């Protein structure tokens, strides 16, 4: 073998090993993130952490009960806004619209999807907080809801399109009108995929902090109704992490573990279901 | 209803009351209109978003004009605002993140698409997709308590000792600063680069690889000189996509960049980014001009990400056409 050939083979081996190293490095980040968070968070987790309000500033202890309920409320508002818009928008794009309006709706959704989350916060601030003159759960939920729309729209559209033609034709052959076909055959056939898409979008916005900073703001107590500033898990993690108190740092770790756990478990479930479905379809 | 009229498609012609009732009873027109309203609402929200940013930034745009983008006073007391330090910080941290994340992500994508057996590739891709789902505040939390001490006590002193003659490695090692923000951003955007690039690489037709191998090229030469160039536009698309993400990333950057409006060549220096200053000062902003200046920053950020996302979509469309219809 010539020296040149040896050189080429060595180079090939070295470079390919390097790509393997890159993959290993990337994956190990997740292991490190999970491991470190679990290690630090688990020591601060105690059942009172889930049931207590935050302790007064300066005292140790206390929990994040209001933030957990707050996050749930915010997600509920977000779902009320995001799910109908995303789902019915997808039905319009996939079933009714002619190419040009379909393109415009899809393009709007893509544009929304690319908007940085902090800018979404400004939007919600100008549309909800300014007219109401105060921070509220409505404003935060609105910001999160708008962020859910493009995710739900694009994946629902795809699931609606993969419903086999034969199903539609069957429904129409027995005399169903178009909307009946869609409502009773097409959407139910795609419902598994659409449901996972909704869950995925919820888990995505559940971790969003930036759009809540000046919309939902935060609250160290229970908020009554949806018209008040409200605590949320990500904002609590943020404020505790940048605070100067050791006890708050400890709680930031614990809250971080709770948030990441919820997000990752939802993601894992959804992705497993989705990949199983697409495997069946093939 | 006429014997020949079917129930499919827009119902009957004619405008009389009977035709109207027939259309209503059939429901298709109603369903069409209802879904149209929801679709139109999505368009309306998008237009409203751009409109709100434009309207509420008007006072600031009128007062400072283009000077806003290239002056560096940020003085809420006298209502004088220039965004240069924030734009600088955003660009430096994003650039640094790309410098680290593109080679790393591309390498990992090459491994996953060209080398790894399908099962391992699928498993690793799954894990990397999960990484993309980790909320940014979690990355920030981890960075504050692990990355910052490490940078301040080990990495930055080491860089100063060995490469200290370079202007980018000068000054005291605080931990917080451009370097920390760039590193966190790099970790956050790698998953995007990997998953998009991997898909693009996998859609390169197999005969391209076979032809190169048949000509006697080594595995690496095939990958680097045939497969990667073929997928070039798609890979560029993934880079633009992740660049837009990095520009708009708020929480993790806010937590580690140091939040000081300084323009410094040194990566060790604390700085500020557009998203970070909005996050920090918006709730405290008193006075219309202050808020307006912050919203103009939001407008700048929006336009930057809008352009980058547009370019990314164009490039990915081109690469999908070239991929010969196969999808990974």
Image (cartoon, coloured by chain):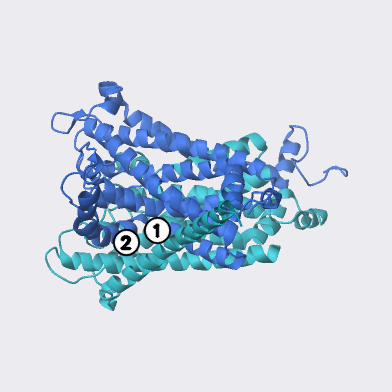
Q: Residue furthest left?
A: A58
Question: Alpha-carbon neighbours of circle 2 within 10 Å: few (<14), some, or many (≥20)?
Answer: many
Whether residue A32 appears in this view of the structure is yes
Residue at image point 38% right, 62% down: A72
At 56% across and 53% down in the image, what residue appears? A3
Please tell me which residue lies in front, B32 or B143: B143
Any part of residue A87 in sight:
no
In the picture, measured across the screen, residue A67 lies left or right of residue B206, that is left
Per the image, label 2 sits on a secondary structure element best described as helix
Residue position marked by numbered label 2 in the rendering: A233
Please tell me in which quadrant of the rendered image residue B324 appears: top right
Callout 2: chain: A
- Mark 1 belongs to chain: A
Question: In the image, is residue B242 above or below residue A245?
Answer: above
- Would you place residue B88 above or below residue A173 in this image? above
What secondary structure is found at the residue carrying circle 1? Answer: helix
Image quarter hosting the N terminus of chain A: bottom right
Mark 1 is surrounded, within 10 Å at the Cα level, by few (under 14), some (14 to 19) or many (20 or more) other residues, namely many
- Residue B313: x, y in percent? 54, 40
Spot occupied by residue A35 in the image (x, y as percentages of width and height): 35, 71
Q: Are the residues tagged 2 and 1 within 8 Å (C-beta)?
A: yes
Mark 2–mark 1 Cα distance, whole angstroms, equals 8 Å
Marks 2 and 1, the one that precedes in the sequence: 1
Q: Colour of chain B?
A: blue
Task: Work out whether residue B167 or residue B197 is closer to the camera in this orientation and state it.
Answer: B167
Colour cyan, chain? A
Task: Please give the residue where the numbered disc 1 appears in the rendered image.
Answer: A206
Residue depicted at 58% across the width and 50% down the height: B221
């Amino acid at each position: 073998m010539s020296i040149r050939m040896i050189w080429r083979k060595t180079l090939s081996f070295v470079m390919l090993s390097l790509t393997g190293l890159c993959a290993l490095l990337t994956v190990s980040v997740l292991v490190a993130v999970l491991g470190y968070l679990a290690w630090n968070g688990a020591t601060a987790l105690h059942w009172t952490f889930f049931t207590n309000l935050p302790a007064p500033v300066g005292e140790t202890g206390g929990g994040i009960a209001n933030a957990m309920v707050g996050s749930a409320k915010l997600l509920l508002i977000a779902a009320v806004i995001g799910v109908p818009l995303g789902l019915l928008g997808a039905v319009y794009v996939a079933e009714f619209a002619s190419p040009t309006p379909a393109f415009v709706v899809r393009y709007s959704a893509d544009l929304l999807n690319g908007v940085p989350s902090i800018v979404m916060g400004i939007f919600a601030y100008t549309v909800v907080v300014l007219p109401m003159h105060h921070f509220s759960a409505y404003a935060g939920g609105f910001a999160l809801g708008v962020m859910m729309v493009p995710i739900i729209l694009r994946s629902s559209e795809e699931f609606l399109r993969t419903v086999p033609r034969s199903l539609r034709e069957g429904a129409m052959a027995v005399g169903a009108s178009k909307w009946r076909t869609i409502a009773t055959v097409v959407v139910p056939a795609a419902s598994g995929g659409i449901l996972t898409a909704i869950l995925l979008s919820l888990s995505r916005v559940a971790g969003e902090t930036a759009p809540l900073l000046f919309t939902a703001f935060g609250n160290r107590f229970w908020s009554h109704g949806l018209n008040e500033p409200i605590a949320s898990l990500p904002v609590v993690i943020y404020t505790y992490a940048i605070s100067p108190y050791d006890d708050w740092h400890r709680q930031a770790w614990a809250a971080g573990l709770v948030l990441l756990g919820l997000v990752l478990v939802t993601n894992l479930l959804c992705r497993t279901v989705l990949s199983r479905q697409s495997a069946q379809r093939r | 209803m006429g014997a020949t009229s079917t129930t499919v498609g827009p119902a009957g012609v004619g405008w009389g009351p009977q035709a109207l009732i027939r259309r209503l009873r059939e429901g298709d027109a109603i369903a069409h209109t209802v879904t149209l309203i929801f679709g139109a609402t999505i368009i309306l929200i998008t237009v409203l978003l751009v409109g709100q940013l434009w309207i509420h930034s008007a006072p600031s745009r009128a007062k400072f004009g283009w000077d806003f983008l290239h002056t560096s006073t940020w003085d809420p007391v006298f209502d004088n605002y220039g965004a240069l330090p924030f734009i600088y910080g955003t660009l430096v941290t994003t650039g640094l993140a790309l410098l680290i994340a593109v080679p790393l992500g591309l390498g990992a994508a090459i491994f996953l698409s060209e080398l790894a057996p399908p099962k391992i590739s699928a498993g690793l891709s799954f894990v990397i997709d999960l990484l993309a789902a980790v909320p940014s505040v979690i990355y920030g939390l981890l960075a504050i308590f692990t990355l910052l001490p490490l940078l301040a006590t080990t990495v930055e002193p080491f860089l100063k000792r060995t490469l200290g003659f370079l202007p980018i490695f000068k000054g005291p090692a605080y931990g917080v600063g451009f370097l920390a923000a760039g590193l966190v951003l790099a970790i956050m955007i790698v998953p995007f680069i990997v998953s998009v690039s991997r898909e693009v690489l996998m859609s390169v037709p197999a005969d391209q690889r076979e032809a190169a191998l048949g000509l006697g090229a080594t595995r690496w030469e095939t990958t680097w000189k045939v497969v990667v160039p073929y997928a070039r536009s798609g890979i560029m698309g993934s880079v633009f996509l992740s660049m837009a993400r990095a520009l708009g990333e708020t929480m993790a950057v806010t937590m580690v960049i140091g939040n000081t409006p300084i323009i410094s060549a040194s990566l060790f220096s604390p700085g500020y980014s557009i998203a970070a200053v909005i996050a920090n000062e918006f709730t405290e902003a008193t006075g219309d001009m202050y808020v307006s200046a912050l919203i103009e920053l939001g407008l700048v950020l929006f336009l930057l990400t809008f352009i980058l996302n547009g370019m990314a979509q164009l490039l990915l469309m081109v690469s999908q056409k070239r991929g010969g219809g196969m999808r990974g």
